[in-house]
Image: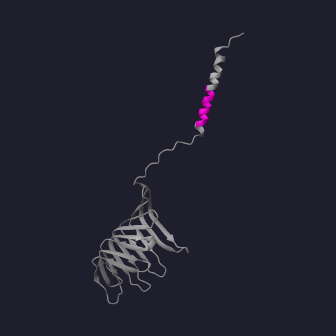
């Protein structure tokens, strides 16, 4: 009887090693890819825009407000954006248009809060029985969903020939009610009916 050669006796071992290798390869191929840890978001710009403009329309397609800026820088962590020379225009049916401007500003991710800083100015044009109205301060906050403009900074208000100052302000564009807070001073013209109050 012929004795098995070394090659013949090694064949089962080679087959077992090949089978183990194929099994390992199949296992690795079917495993889901390794999950890499998500990078924490930083307060860093992730995109830019020039001549930025965003509008909101009502159900009839009429513009309710329009926010524009010379430039916009968006930050990835809080979804806020910095604005250069922003302008916010609010449109109400049968109401004078209101425009708020400043040197710089910020807007949150869903465009529900717009902050205006440095030489912040509000202009409500004359019309529909109202005289022109302006307000000046170093900061105005526009609550877009509430159609309200407010400030906690000193403010100067002029409505027609009447001029007043206060330590804060709240203006409801829908009701056209203006409130001044703190030390309110000024002169109200006899022909003017300026609805102000102080707290």
Q: What residue is rendered at 32% in x and 84% in y? A: 162
Q: From the viewer's perspective, is residue 19 above or below residue 166?
A: above
Viewport quadrant of the N terminus: top right
Give how far across and how far down residue 82 sits, in percent: 39, 61
Q: What residue is rendered at 63% in x and 19% in y? A: 10
Q: Nearer the viewer, residue 194 or 104?
A: 194
Give how far across and how far down residue 184 sits, in percent: 28, 79
- Asked whether, in this view, residue 154 is left or right of residue 64, the answer is left
Q: Nearer the viewer, residue 25 or 133?
A: 25
Q: Nearer the viewer, residue 84 or 159?
A: 159
Query: Residue extending furthest bottom?
Result: 190
Viewport quadrant of the C terminus: bottom left
Total marks drawn?
Answer: 0
Give how far across and how far down residue 49 sits, in percent: 45, 60
Q: What residue is rendered at 44% in x and 73% in y? A: 146
Query: Residue extending furthest right?
Result: 1
Q: How is the image coloured?
A: one colour
Q: From the viewer's perspective, is residue 104 above or below residue 26?
A: below
Magenta stretch, overall SS: helix
- The quadrant where residue 27 appears: top right
- The quadrant where residue 104 appears: bottom left
Give how far across and how far down residue 126 sits, in percent: 41, 82
- The quadrant where residue 118 appears: bottom left
- Asked whether, in this view, residue 26 is left or right of residue 190, the answer is right
Q: Which residues are magenta?
A: 17-27
Q: What residue is rendered at 61% in x and 35% in y? A: 26
């Amino acid at each position: 009887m012929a004795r098995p050669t070394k090659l013949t006796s090694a064949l089962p071992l080679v087959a077992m090693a090949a089978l183990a290798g194929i099994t390992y390869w199949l296992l690795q191929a079917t495993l889901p890819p390794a999950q890499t840890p998500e990078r924490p978001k930083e307060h860093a710009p992730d995109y830019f825009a020039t001549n930025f403009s965003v509008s909101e329309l009502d159900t009839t397609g009429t513009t309710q407000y329009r926010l524009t800026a010379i430039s916009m820088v968006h930050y990835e962590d809080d979804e806020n954006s910095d604005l250069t020379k922003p302008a916010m225009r609010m449109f109400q049916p049968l109401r004078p248009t209101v425009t708020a401007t400043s040197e710089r500003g910020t807007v949150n991710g869903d465009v529900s809060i717009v902050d205006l800083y440095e030489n912040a100015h509000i202009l409500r044009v004359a019309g529909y029985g109202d005289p022109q109205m302006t307000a000046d301060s170093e900061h105005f906050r526009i609550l877009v969903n509430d159609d309200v403009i407010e400030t906690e900074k000193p403010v100067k208000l002029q409505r027609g020939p009447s001029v007043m100052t206060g330590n804060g302000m709240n203006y409801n564009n829908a009701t056209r009610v203006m409130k001044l807070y703190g030390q309110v001073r000024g002169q109200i013209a006899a022909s003017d009916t300026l609805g102000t109050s102080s707290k």
